[in-house]
Image (cartoon, rainbow, N blue to C red):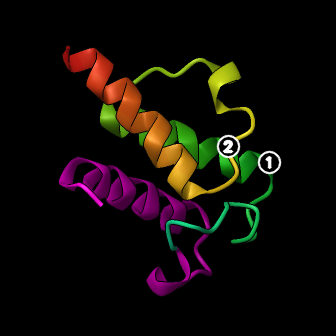
Amino acid sequence: MDPEKQKIFDIVKANTLKVLVDLKPGDVTIDKSLTDLGANSVDRVEVVMYSMEELNLEVPRAELHGISNLRGLVDLLHRHAGSRQA
C-alpha cells in the first residue's frame, strides 16, 4: 500500500477502534467492512465522519454508497485528498 493510503488507513483504523471499543487493533484489516467488524449504521457514520474531519475532507454522501470494505473507504478518501491538493 502506498504511504499516503497507509496514512489514511491508519486514521480510519484509529477511528474504528475509537467507535468500536471492543475491537482489538488486529481485528481491523483493510479488507474488512465496518459491518463485518460489528458496526451499526450510526457507528459507520461516526467512523466516516471522524475520519473525514481528521483529514479535513468533505465527501458527498452519494459517493459513500456502495463501499464494501475499508479498502474502498481508504481509496475514496485518498481520491478526495489528492483532488484537494491538485
Q: What residue is shown at x 24% (from left), y 55% (from top)?
A: 2
Give x and y (percent) for residue 69. Answer: 63, 56
Q: Residues within 10 Å of mark 2 (few under 14, many from 20)?
A: some
Give x and y (percent) for residue 6. Answer: 29, 58
Residue situated furthest front in the rendering: 1
Q: Nearer the viewer, residue 8 or 38?
A: 8
Instruction: Report, in whole angstroms, how far the alpha carbon at label 1 lies from the one at label 2.
Output: 13 Å
Q: Amino acid at mark 1?
A: Ser
| Residue 71 - label | none
Image quadrant where one finds the C terminus: top left
Q: Residues within 10 Å of mark 1 (few under 14, many from 20)?
A: few
| Residue 67 - label | 2
Residue 6 placement, left or right of 3? right
Which is the main secondary structure of the residues drawn in magenta? helix
Q: What residue is shown at x 76% (from left), y 62% (from top)?
A: 35
Give x and y (percent) for residue 36. Answer: 74, 70
Residue picked out by circle 1: 41
- Mark 2 lies on a secondary structure that is loop
Q: Nearer the viewer, residue 10 or 67?
A: 67
Relative to 55, residue 43 above or below:
below
Sequence order check, earlier mark of 1 and 2: 1
Q: Amino acid at mark 2?
A: Ile
Corner quadrant of residue 75: top left
Q: Which residues are magenta?
A: 1-28
Residue 10 within the magenta-colored segment of the rendering: yes
